[in-house]
Image (tube, rainbow, N blue to C red):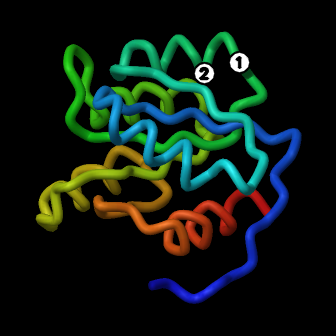
C-alpha cells in the first residue's frame, strides 16, 4: 500500500494519453482522476498528432511506444518537430535502455515504466504541469 501524497489540482489543464490498449487507458484515467485534469485519448501516433493540431490547449502527452500504425517513437519525433514546446512523457513496458535512448533522441521529456503507479505518474507530471 502506497503512502498518501499530495494530489495537485490541475483543473483547466489538458493532457493527451496516446494509448491503444483500453485497459491501460482506463488505468491511466483512473490514476489521474483526482487531479481534475482534462484527459483526451489517441489510440495511435497519427491520432496523437491530429489531436495536438486540433487541441492546442494540450500541454502534455503520455505516449505509449507500441501502437498500431504510427508508433509512439515516430509520433514523438513529428510532434517535437512541429510543436517543440509540448511535453512528451513516454509510458511503456519496455525497460531496455535502447528504447530510452531512442525516445530521448526523438525529444521525449521523461520516461515512465508500466505498470504505472499513481505517485510516480503524478510526481513526473508535476515537473511539467505545476
Q: From the viewer's perspective, tell me whether residue 37 is left or right of residue 9.
A: left
Q: Nearer the viewer, residue 112 or 33?
A: 33
Q: Tell me the residue that label 1 is attached to.
A: 55
- How packed mark 2 is, by other alpha carbons closer than 10 Å (few <14, some 14-19, many 20 or more), is many
Residue 92 vertical placement versus 25 (above, below): below
Q: Which mark is residue 92?
A: none
Give coordinates of residue 58: x percent, y percent: 69, 32
> Which of the image's four quarters has the C terminus?
bottom right
Disc 1 is placed on an element classified as loop
Q: Tell me the residue that label 2 is attached to.
A: 52
Q: Are marks 2 and 1 in contact (CB under 8 Å)?
A: yes
Q: From the viewer's perspective, tell me whether residue 12 is left or right of residue 112.
A: right
User: Rounded to the nearest whole Å, what is the CA distance between mark 2 and mark 1?
Assistant: 5 Å
Which residue is pictured at 67% across the width and 11% down the height?
54
Which residue is pictured at 55% across the width and 55% down the height?
31
Give coordinates of residue 76: x percent, y percent: 40, 35
Amino acid at each position: 500500500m502506497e503512502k498518501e501524497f499530495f494530489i495537485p489540482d490541475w483543473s483547466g489543464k489538458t493532457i493527451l494519453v496516446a494509448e491503444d490498449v483500453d485497459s491501460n487507458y482506463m488505468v491511466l484515467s483512473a490514476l489521474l482522476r483526482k487531479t481534475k485534469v482534462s484527459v483526451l485519448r489517441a489510440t495511435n501516433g497519427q491520432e496523437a498528432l491530429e489531436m495536438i493540431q486540433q487541441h492546442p490547449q494540450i500541454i502534455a502527452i503520455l505516449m505509449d511506444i507500441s501502437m498500431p500504425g504510427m508508433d509512439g517513437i515516430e509520433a514523438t519525433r513529428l510532434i517535437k518537430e512541429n510543436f517543440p514546446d509540448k511535453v512528451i512523457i513516454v509510458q511503456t513496458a519496455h525497460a531496455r535502455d535502447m528504447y530510452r535512448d531512442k525516445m530521448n533522441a526523438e525529444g521525449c521529456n521523461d520516461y515512465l515504466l508500466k505498470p504505472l503507479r499513481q505517485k510516480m505518474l503524478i510526481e513526473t507530471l508535476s515537473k511539467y504541469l505545476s
